[in-house]
Image (cartoon, coloured by chain):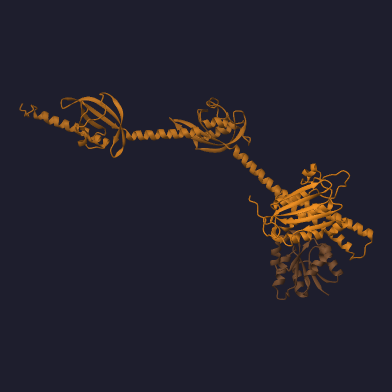
């Protein structure tokens, strides 16, 4: 069973992504802060990380940099979950070490297809 | 008496006295600061003293036997200007008296050198003229005050106070001040105090509210300075009208307020766009999930109702987005993200996104474009405009087809060019000629009798046109009522920032 880590502080977004992914048969690990996200990413070695950018404490950019800086990082795909305002900073997101991004708001009609694009 | 005599018959004592007298006079003549010249009756020079040599800047030898060259009238004093070799011109007061020289009638010419005095006088005169010129041409009001009344004033004062000289001279110092100053002090008491200080302590500088002859008050900067003329103390007042400057300062303040309002507006846009969109996204997202049936199958009626929640939410979100965009455009807060992208790919994506709506209405869509078309612009905004044009076409067309044609301004098969056009043509209801003017206006909806009003915000085309303009392009419309419309978006292939 493929493991997906969601780092997201918004309860509704977390619920929505978790619901769709578990219904489609994925194992979901949840983190509400960037710090916990870094910890779980390195400990659990998921097949994919879905990372919100705006988070309390360290933000998604910083969390991703820390995961990438660690030796335990097995080139896990990390996908930024970002609102449209952020896409102007696409280059900044990619420079932080993200594999790609999925636009917010999450569209249930296309979400699964987008996620599966990033899972090997 | 044994007096020795000389051969001229003078006795020696007389001779001695004469010698002494001559020595005294010679000394006077030699040391006289005035030039002393003796000429014969015809003006031929017989003698000049050292002061004359100095005044004319010539040696005695060069004078002797020469004609003096100026008309000599005994008993008269005249001012003479002379040219002096190797020296600045000289000025002298020349006095001529009749005398005898070696028993012949002669002229004694005494010249007082007044060159220096003349220069000083000239400098003083120039200074006075300069002051007068400054006094008369200054834009500021300059007034002289003595014995409790205005005594003199310049042209500037007439302009500043808007009256004639006669209305100023002889008046009290507060004739052109309102009864009180803005802070409530009585003008006459305050003016009296300040004038006194200027007399006793030194120059005074202050802001003052004056009024013109017609009573209009104005802000002024005043300086008072004591001036002693012919032993009489005067006060020179310089009054500068600063009402323009004050107004400019007030305008600056208004501008600052406007900028603050603008800032709050931007803040409002930013927070609204977040606060309004977040719950709407939840509504749209969760109704979408329910519709997928992941939580359990829905019956047809439930599907229809949840579908309505979803489409209403989407409509409301579109409205919110449009309103925010319009506000941004008005506040000039549109930020562009200029990147290179493939327009052909974008248009294909747009076509695909309309597939369900087209299927539902039974319409066909024809796409006529090259496989690839690189352009550099704001992809999201270009997409927004094309989406709007296509969605209008779908909305107002009930049967037939929609065509999208994308073309550069060069013949097919050639790359480059400067502009591309994206034309969206439909076989819909069309627009009457008289309604064409309303198309691109904010919140304007064209109502056609007998036709249901189609869902929309009334902002779509307005926004499309504004955004096209921001991207350096335009939108055009052509239509035949009841036959169809064609909307064309023209954009530069490469966005260039407008010169401001």
Identify whether B384 is placed above or below B166.
below
Residue depicted at x 26% and y 24%: B73
State the residue in front, B42 or B149: B42
Identify whether A46 is placed above or below B326.
below
Specify the quadrant of the image occupied by residue A29: bottom right
Specify the quadrant of the image occupied by residue B241: top right
Q: Is residue B276 visible?
A: no
* x, y percent for residue B22: 16, 31
- Would residue B476 be found to the left or right of residue B287 on screen? left
Give the letter of the brown chain: A
Specify the quadrant of the image occupied by residue B17: top left
State the residue in front, B17 or B352: B352
Residue depicted at x 70% and y 76%: A71
* x, y percent for residue B148: 52, 28
State the residue in front, A64 or B238: A64
Identify whether A98 is placed above or below B184.
below
- Would residue B185 be found to the left or right of residue A82 on screen? left
* x, y percent for residue B142: 52, 33
* x, y percent for residue B216: 62, 31
- Would residue A85 be found to the left or right of residue B292 on screen? left
Q: How many marks?
A: 0
State the residue in front, B84 or A102: A102
Give the letter of the orange chain: B
């Amino acid at each position: 069973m493929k493991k997906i880590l969601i780092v997201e502080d918004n309860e509704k977004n977390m619920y929505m992504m978790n619901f769709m992914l578990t219904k489609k048969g994925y194992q979901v690990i949840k983190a509400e802060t960037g710090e916990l996200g870094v910890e779980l990413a390195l400990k659990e070695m998921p097949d994919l990380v879905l990372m919100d950018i705006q988070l309390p404490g360290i933000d998604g950019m910083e969390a991703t940099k820390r995961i990438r800086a660690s030796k335990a990082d097995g080139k896990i795909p990390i996908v930024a979950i970002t609102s449209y305002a952020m896409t102007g900073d696409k280059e900044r997101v990619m420079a932080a070490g993200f594999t790609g991004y999925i636009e917010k708001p999450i569209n249930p009609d296309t979400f699964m297809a987008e996620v599966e694009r990033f899972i090997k | 008496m044994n007096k020795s005599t000389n051969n001229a018959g003078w006795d020696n004592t007389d001779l001695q006295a004469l010698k002494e007298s001559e020595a005294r006079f010679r000394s006077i003549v030699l040391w006289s600061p005035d030039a002393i010249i003796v000429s014969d009756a015809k003006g031929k020079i017989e003698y000049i003293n050292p002061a004359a040599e100095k005044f004319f800047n010539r040696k005695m030898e060069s004078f002797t036997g020469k004609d003096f060259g100026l008309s000599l009238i005994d008993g008269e004093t005249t001012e003479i200007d002379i040219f002096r070799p190797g020296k600045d011109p000289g000025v002298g007061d020349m006095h001529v008296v009749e005398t005898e020289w070696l028993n012949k009638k002669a002229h004694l010419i005494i010249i007082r050198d007044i060159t220096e005095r003349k220069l000083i006088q000239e400098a003083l005169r120039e200074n006075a003229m300069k002051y007068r010129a400054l006094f008369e041409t200054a834009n500021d009001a300059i007034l002289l005050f003595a014995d409790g009344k205005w005594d003199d004033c310049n042209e500037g004062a007439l302009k500043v106070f808007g009256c004639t000289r006669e209305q100023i001279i002889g008046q009290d110092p507060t004739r052109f001040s309102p009864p009180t100053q803005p802070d409530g002090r009585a003008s006459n008491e305050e003016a009296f105090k300040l004038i006194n200080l200027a007399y006793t302590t030194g120059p005074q500088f202050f802001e003052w509210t004056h009024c013109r002859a017609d009573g209009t008050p104005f802000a002024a900067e005043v300086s008072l300075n004591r001036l002693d003329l012919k032993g009489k103390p005067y006060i020179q007042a310089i009054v500068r009208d600063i009402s323009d400057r004050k107004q400019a300062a007030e305008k600056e303040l208004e501008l600052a307020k406007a900028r603050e309002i603008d800032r709050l507006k931007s803040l409002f846009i930013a927070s609204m766009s977040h606060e309004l969109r977040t719950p709407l996204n939840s509504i749209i997202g969760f109704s979408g999930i329910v519709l997928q049936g992941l939580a359990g199958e829905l019956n047809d009626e439930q599907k229809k109702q949840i579908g309505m929640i979803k489409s209403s939410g989407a409509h409301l979100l579109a409205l919110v987005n449009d309103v925010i965009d319009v506000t941004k455009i008005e506040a000039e807060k549109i930020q562009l993200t200029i990147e290179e992208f493939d327009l052909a790919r974008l248009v294909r994506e747009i076509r695909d996104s309309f597939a369900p709506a087209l299927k539902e209405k039974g319409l066909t869509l024809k796409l006529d474009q090259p496989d690839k078309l690189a352009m550099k612009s704001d992809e999201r905004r270009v997409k927004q405009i094309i989406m709007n044009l296509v969605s209008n076409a779908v909305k107002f067309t009930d049967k037939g087809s929609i065509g999208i044609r994308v073309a550069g301004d060069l013949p097919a098969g050639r790359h480059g060019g400067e502009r591309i056009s994206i034309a969206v043509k439909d076989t819909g209801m069309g627009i009457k000629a008289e309604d064409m003017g309303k198309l691109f206006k904010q919140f304007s909806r064209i109502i056609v009798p007998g036709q249901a009003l189609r869902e929309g915000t009334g902002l779509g085309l307005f926004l499309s046109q504004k955004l096209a303009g921001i991207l350096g392009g335009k939108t055009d419309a052509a239509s035949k009522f009841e036959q169809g419309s064609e909307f064309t978006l023209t954009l530069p292939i490469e966005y260039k920032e407008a010169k401001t």
